[in-house]
Image (cartoon, rainbow, N blue to C red):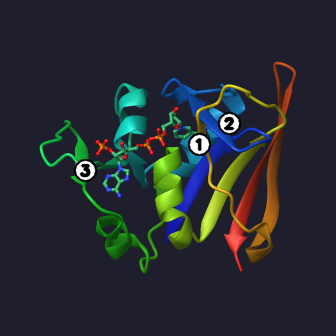
Amino acid sequence: MISMIAAVGKNRELGKNNDLIWSLSEDKKFFRSTTLSHTVVMGRKTFESLGGLLPKRRHVVLTSNKSFHADGVDVVHGVSDVTDEFAASEEECFIIGGGEIYTLFLPYAERIYLTEIDDVCPDAEVFFPEFDKSRYSKKLISEIEENGIHAEIKLYTRI
Ligand SMILES: NC(=O)c1ccc[n+]([C@@H]2O[C@H](COP(=O)([O-])OP(=O)(O)OC[C@H]3O[C@@H](n4cnc5c(N)ncnc54)[C@H](OP(=O)(O)O)[C@@H]3O)[C@@H](O)[C@H]2O)c1
């Protein structure tokens, strides 16, 4: 099964300057506990923004660069490398960004774990793709109040 996990602002803002916009510790905890021991799939830019490996997760990085190598990372060059392994599998893999990669995998995502942050970022550069919420059931997982910012973690499941 292919799932996506992301944190977005009110206008689907994801990032700027190849970095995150918001830093909510409760959301980081949710991300860690949800993805722990699973495969995480990301674009080359998001991988570089991490500055290292996320502990106890298998890393898959998408790039068009055939000579790209990084320690502890499985490098792939196309969406089908991931969908062939996970789309029909019981094992849940997590697409963790960024904008290009969410867009590529949206048609395959059965679940979208979305932290909806009640804030805007006018100079955001990267956005989560628009998706038809009427095609998903919605469940509130938890609410966050941190540093004056309100956010809701929701799970969208394809109907
Ligand atoms: N808020 C959140 O939840 C969240 C989560 C993750 C990331 N982010 C943010 O998102 C931003 C990065 O997102 P982004 O959209 O700029 O980059 P990205 O999606 O992380 O990576 C884009 C790269 O993926 C590779 N790629 C894309 N399509 C491909 C394909 N069809 N086949 C093979 N490789 C492909 C290319 O790598 P090559 O150029 O090497 O070919 C491309 O440059 C950062 O600001 C980051 O902090 C936010």
- Report the Cα–Cα distance between label 1 and label 3: 27 Å
- Which amino acid is tagged 1? Phe
Determine which quarter of the picture holds residue 125: top right
Residue at numbered disc 2: 27
Mark 3 residue type: Ser
The crowding category of the residue bearing disc 3, from other C-alpha atoms within 10 Å (few below 14, some 14 to 19, many at least 20), is few
| Residue that carries the numbered disc 1 in the rendered image | 31
Q: Nearer the viewer, residue 62 or 28?
A: 62
Q: Is residue 34 left or right of residue 159?
A: left
Q: Residue at x 53, y 46 (%)?
A: 99
For residue 108, say whether it is visible. Answer: yes
Q: Dots 1 and 2: beta carbons under 8 Å?
A: yes
Q: Any atom of ligand 1 within 8 Å of the CB at mark 3?
A: yes
Indicate which quadrant contains ligand 1: top left
Q: Secondary structure at mark 1?
A: helix
- Crowd band around label 2 with a 10 angstrom C-alpha radius: few (<14), some (14–19), many (20+): many
Q: Quadrant of residue 132?
A: bottom right
Would you name the residue on which mark 3 appears? 64
Q: Report x, y in % for residue 54.
A: 40, 36
Residue 95 in sight: no
In the depicted structure, whether residue 24 falls above or below residue 86: above
